[in-house]
Amino acid sequence: MIRFDNVRKVYPQGTREVAALDGLTMEVGKGEFLAVMGPSGSGKSTFLHLSGGLDLPTSGSVSIEGSATSTLTDDALTLLRRRRIGFVFQFFNLIPTLRVIENVSLPLLLDGKRQGDARPRAEALLDRLGLGHRKEHFPDELSGGEMQRTAVARALVIDPAIVLADEPTGNLDSATGRGILELLKEVAEKEGRTVVMVTHDPAAAAWGTRTVRLRDGKLDGGAP
Amino acid sequence: MRALKALLRYFSLRHSIRHPLRVALGAAAIALGVALYVSVDAANSTVARSFERSMSDLAGKAELQVTTAGGLGVDAAALEKIRDLPGVIASPIVQRSLSLNDLKDGSLLVLGIDFGRDAPIRMYTFDTGGADAKEFVTAAFVPNSIIVTKRFAEKNGLARGSKVRTDTPRGRATLVVTGLMENEGPAKALGGNFAVMPLHAAQSLFGIPRRFDRIEVAPDGIDVAELRKRVKAALGDGYDVKRLSRKSTTVEVALARMKSMVVISAIALVVGLFIIYNSVSISVVERTHDIGILRSIGAGRRSILATVVLEWTGVGLLGSAGGVVAGWALSRALVDMVPKSANMLTFAVKVEAVEFSPRGAAIAIAAGTLAAALAALIPGIGAMRITPIDLLRQGTYTYRAAPAYLKTFGVGAFMIAAAAAALYFGEAAFHPTVHLALTTVSFFAIALCGPQATIWVARATRPLLRKFFRIEGYLAADNVSKFPQRTALTVVAFGGAIAVMVASATLVRSMKTASERWMRDAFPFDLSVNATDLSQAIYSTASYGEDVLEKVRKVEGVEAAYGVRAAFLPFDGLEIMLIAVDTDEYFAMHRARGGESSVRKFDTPEFRSAFMAGECIVVSENFARLLGLSPGDPVELPTPQGPRSFTMRASMEDYSWPAGSVLMDRGAYKRIWGDPSITYTDIRVVPGTSIELVRPRVAVALKDTSTVFLYDVPQLQKVGQDAMDQALALAHVQVVIALVIGFLGIVNTLLISVLRRTREIGLLRAVGTTRAQIRRGVIIESVFIAVMGSAVGIAAGLVGAAWPMRLYILRMAGFWFPFTVPWDSIGVAVGAGAVLGVIASIVPARRAAGLNVLDAIGYE
């Protein structure tokens, strides 16, 4: 589903360059729930960004569903994100001026769906995630868990093949975090989607079907 | 399309609702520019159309007019030649503007007509009071009768049988209202201030026996070309047969003044463009986070660009629509102003209501909307370039256009130098439009230089500000240099407003200084006896007989007097002013007055002899410039005997008429044009005699001859000054609007500055900066921007705007006003700049000082 071949990603930092990923080669299979761990600066986030086509490798190749991201145009990458990939962020990243239902239905509207089609789908998903009673609220009226469940709903509303989650429980208390992890597990196991989750927390990583550790842009302990 | 709709609905509209002030400022800036354009356009087309309609109502079915080239009308022989031609309807006309001083609204255009000949051309509907038409005409068309419109009668409380008094070249006359016209056909012209009288009565009253001003000709079953052919063939040489004029030089001049305001509305739109640019830039920065989210969930780059541009295009459209409404209101004021200005020159325009110009409104809305769209384009491209990665690295992204300020400074400086060189060396070659375009280019070039210049100035003044205003001054200068682009744009926007103010003041001052000097120079007399009330019309050619001059010369205390005949001559599609003077007395009076009179430069016995023989003339400097004449060149003037060549002997400074004037001997004029009447008589009193003693004596001597108006030199200077003030009143409107826009620009920038620094202000407050210090910092920043703007504006106003506008006047009227720097106005500009700076800072300073520390620190 996602394949990294000898991927190197270098960022300028002041006058020098820092390699966030340094010759990484690995693969994420379909329906897999992969947990990515590692200390700060190990390249976890960069791995996630490249997996979602948010960024491109400096060298090497990243393939998503068989397409090398470096060969895709910006429009094609945008379309890929819009239709095949759902993102869940640590700080939720909901649009504060939009109600919950609007935040969730937005990806469908961006894909050209009619309001009449997008809204019922978003409502169904919110009901499923226990947010049916909050759909007309604004993000700042929700608890942290509710905000993150809204973010998950937004990621799932497009029926993605891949869900990428960056520290999805990092900003939540443990009980609420557990609810989100259960949800991600269900998404992978029951719906057959590929889930890649970056986390610091070993307890969270334990929910994954596989865990990899990154250190200095490489797999800690060699190839998985 | 649906994606774009969703973005506009959820991304743009929500944001705009949350920031109404910013949206309102952008919209207001555009609205002002649009309002200015719409008002000028509406007033312009209203006045022009009103004039055309009046001309059309007056013309009736007439298509051609016959005159003699001399401008003094046609004789009865011409009528004999054409009146019985097949397919030709000819009607002789005597036309005069009368001022019936006893009435409330007594300006009246009178046509002397032969009713039998004129009826097929103009459809008069008389109120016959029950009599049949023939009886009515027989009774009404008697000597000393006048038939007025019902509207004029109602306005002035007249009825059949009422008597009205008027002054004519033959003295005072009483006319009897013998009939009324329904407000139809020609009676609709000039708001009903129209009358007819019998042709022979008009000829007698106005002192032109057996002559007409023109013969109007209408076709009867033939086309106009054929009509013209037949009339020309019948008349032979010596007559002008041309299309009935529906234009007037005087109205064109009045309209041209107003049209110059369009330039200012363009500058206003450019300033509005800067304000929107600033607003969009900051709204993009504020929404970086949201744009990042949208990009990560699949919003395309082009959709983001389209959203930002469409959002502000919408604001532009809204502002433009508001501007059309505001412009509509403003046009009413302008419409009141322009006819007054036009009618000071000639009685021709009567505006009843402002006419809506859909074309003008559409152009203004399109221009306002386009300006907003253009302003949003560059920040929109910036928004388009925001990658989701920028979102994920929160707080690190700040929107900046190319930071190569030094490079853009170089480009700007080059553009300014090129524009200046083109203006300087190409002065004569370029059309005024090119000059205006170069000025606009310079304006943008200054904007390009702005950011780097701002950095330099801020750095240079930082120690000074720190010394005088301590930490607040330092922070203000630091902030200015941190965001040089934003500051520079505001400086340029405000500078534009000040430039308009300074340019306008420079022009006004130059014109006033020159015309005041000219009036001092051109008036060698003490008292002037006029046939017209100059507070009503300064260019009236109303006249009286030579007996007035003779009587004046005999008044005790009058040392010398000369008569002047002022008339308008058709010349090269324009009307030039012919001023005929009694040579000996005129030049003697100039010599007796002494001083550096420009007239004395060519006053020699040989010149006077040739002048009185009618061989040579003197022309105004603007006439010489417009025609490229030098002394010795021949000037061909139309005379009743056909074109006649005069030698131009000299030119003299004369600002009295935009199309130029010609000075000749009155004796020669009388011989050639056969017109002995006098427009005004200038008197020099016996040295040592009080003017106030002589004035009543003159009035008494003339009381039974004619109504005259007496003016001493200061009064005449005041009349000239008032006329100029009237014409320049529009300039003041421009200045006020420009300043309001510049002011909005500063408020906008400061609000943005405070918003951008919310976190910084919070931190400053957290480490002990007081609210008062924060407030002072914002005020200092504001005044800093205003003072820099004033400096840019003064330089640009003196060089960039006044220069081309001066050239524009030179091209239009040939007037070359010596450049006068209005130092006092510049002082006012600097003071106004600083005061506006302080006022503009009030709301932003309050907002900054009122921030909650914790909220501010948490602000992203």
Image (cartoon, coloured by chain):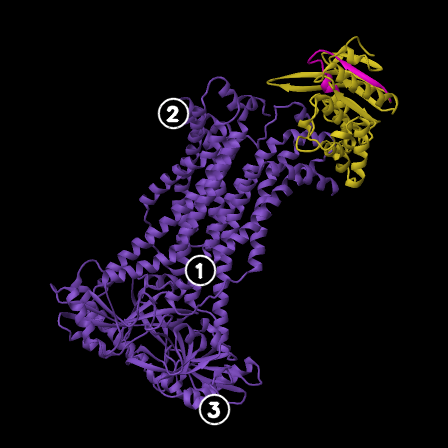
Chain colours: A yellow, B purple
- Report if the CB atoms under discs 3 and 2 are less than 8 Å apart: no
- When the figure is inspected, residue B750 is found, relative to residue B475, above or below; the finding is below
State the CA–CA distance, disc 3 to disc 1. Answer: 47 Å
In depth, the one of B145 and A81 nearer the eye is: B145
- Does residue B424 show up? no
Left or right of residue B254: residue B313: right
Q: Amino acid at mark 2?
A: Phe
The chain letter for the residue carrying disc 2 is B
Q: In terms of image quadrants, where is residue B826?
A: top left
Residue annotated with mark 2: B469
In this rendering, the answer to whether B182 lies above or below B355 is below
Q: Are marks 3 and 2 on the same chain?
A: yes
- Name which quarter of the figure residue B634 lies in: bottom left
Whole-Å distance between the Cαs marked 2 and 1?
Answer: 49 Å
Residue marked by disc 1: B256
| Other-residue count near label 2 (Cα within 10 Å), few / some / many at <14 / 14–19 / ≥20 | some
Q: Which residues are magenta?
A: A31-47
Question: First in sequence: mark 3 or mark 2?
Answer: 3
Identify the mark at residue B134; answer none if there is no mark: 3
- x, y (%) of residue B251? 43, 66
Position in image of residue A41 (x %, y %): 69, 14
Indicate the secondary structure of the residue bearing disc 1: helix
Q: Residues within 10 Å of mark 3 (few under 14, many from 20)?
A: few
Gap between marks 3 and 2 measured at Cα: 91 Å
The N terminus of chain B is located in which quarter? top right
Q: Amino acid at mark 1?
A: Ala
* Mark with earlier residue (3, 1): 3
Residue B306, percent from left and from top:
67, 41
* In the rendered image, residues at marks 3 and 1 fall on the same chain: yes
